[in-house]
Image (tube, rainbow, N blue to C red):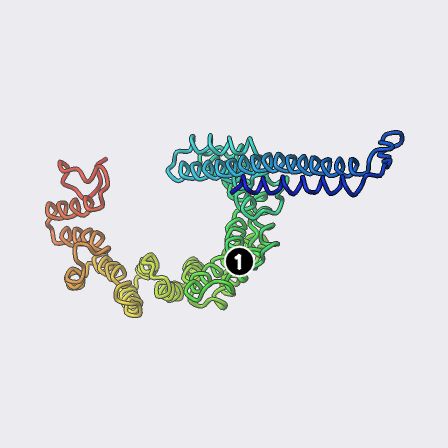
Amino acid sequence: MRTLIYLALGIAAMAAVLTLTSNNDASTSVKLYKDIGVENQPLYVVLIASFFLGVVVTWLMGLLGKISGAVRNRKERKKHASIVKHHEDLVAGREYLAAGNFQQAESTFQKIYSNDGDDVLASSMLAETLFKQGNFPEALKVVDSARQTQKDNVELLFLGADINEAMDNYTAAYDNASLVHKQQPNNIQALRKLISLCEPLKRYPEAIDFQKQLLKLVSSEERSDEAKNLADLELGHARLEAKREGTSLKKAISDVVKRHRSHGPSLAALAAIESEAGDYKSAAKLWSKAYQSDHNVIHLERIADSLVEVDEPAKAVEIVKKSIQNVPSEAAVFGRISLVNLYLRLEMIDEAKEEYDKLSEECTNSHPARVPLDITKAELIRKAGSTDEAFATLKGAVEKLGLPNPISADKPRIGWEG
């Protein structure tokens, strides 16, 4: 088929030449450039020469286009291969990093970074690898270098904040996180980072402001915890300001309690102030509220200590029991163990045994309260006069904790070896 086409084109060309020859026998001159040209040549010769010259020029241009296209395609293939290799190296490096093979990861990312220092992903991954190896100064150098061209890159700013925080450069870390917050005011991660950095910097007012912003952004499931964090910050601020200004700590904490009436740490802090002032009954009531809020049994122990000290054991038992009654049953288990210990402290052995028996039925061997309950059982047995059995019970409880060097078997006493 191709041969026939070429034959047809050849016949057409010959016909064209014959036609030109027969119809254009006059002479002509053609000036190409200045003195360059042809004179007194048959017109058909000029036409035929022009035609073939056009063919040659067109062919040369086509050839040049093909060569240019081939070069361009080669560059594109080379570029594509480079991109594929770059991607494969990044994937390999991230796999090394995920597997904890930090040296191999560092080598891989360093190679990419050396070839292209403007690659933000390679820079951040290299910095992260160095960071995880504890090479904080070098990691920070990589981040700072990358930020020369990517000043406001959020990933680099977060990484810089983490590295600076690890180096105790809290102000620099705060500045990094602050730049993210300025770009993205509703960025929850940036707000959390700023709040955590405000504490070592003693910037409580700013932390409180950030926490209030965060409280508006989190989900309803998180809001309760974040409200508690806000109260924690306000309590810390109240203590710092009272110490700095020499003002009443009691008033400062009371103001926090007014804003956060069920905040356990604030109630406990106010109780401690009342206890130091000798108002043990008020202190006991505040500790009771604190326990009902956060279920921390230390508050119950403080109640016992404060009221027993002023020779009001019955009041101590009454308040501890009432405190436990107002707490969900599962959370109250540890509080009831504390009540048993109070009974034992007051030599109310029958009451202690009765409450212990109830707890023992409720708490299976896998229950979180089983070990502290067994320790209480050991004391109950010791109070009954059976030291050896008490020792064996206590030893078993300690062994359940999986701690090394449990109570010595050759020293039948309640205590630790050494």
Q: Quadrant of residue 364?
A: bottom left
In this orientation, which residue lies closer to the viewer: 146 or 401?
146
In this orientation, which residue lies closer to the viewer: 186 or 44?
44
- Residue 356: tell me if it is visible: yes
Which residue sits furthest front?
22
Q: Quadrant of residue 115?
A: top right
Q: Position of residue 357 (x, y in %)?
A: 14, 62
Q: In the picture shown, does residue 358 fall above or below 129?
A: below
Q: Position of residue 136 (x, y in %)?
A: 51, 35
In this orientation, which residue lies closer to the viewer: 220 or 257?
220
Q: Position of residue 54 (x, y in %)?
A: 72, 38
Q: Position of residue 409 (x, y in %)?
A: 14, 38
Give the residue pinned by disc 1. Answer: 238
In this orientation, which residue lies closer to the viewer: 223 or 359?
223
Position of 302 compared to 216: left or right?
A: left
- Residue 164: tell me if it is visible: no
Identified at 11% across, 51% down, the residue is 385
Position of 209 compared to 50: left or right?
A: left
Identified at 27% across, 65% down, the residue is 317
Q: In the picture shown, does residue 149 fall above or below 181?
A: above
Identified at 84% across, 31% down, the residue is 38
Local SS, label 1: helix
Position of 311 compared to 48: left or right?
A: left
Position of 299 compared to 210: left or right?
A: left
Q: Quadrant of the C terminus?
A: top left
The residue carrying pointer 1 sits among few (fewer than 14), some (14 to 19) or many (20 or more) residues within 10 Å by Cα, namely many
Identified at 87% across, 33% down, the residue is 40
Q: For the residue marked with disc 1, what is the amino acid?
A: Ala
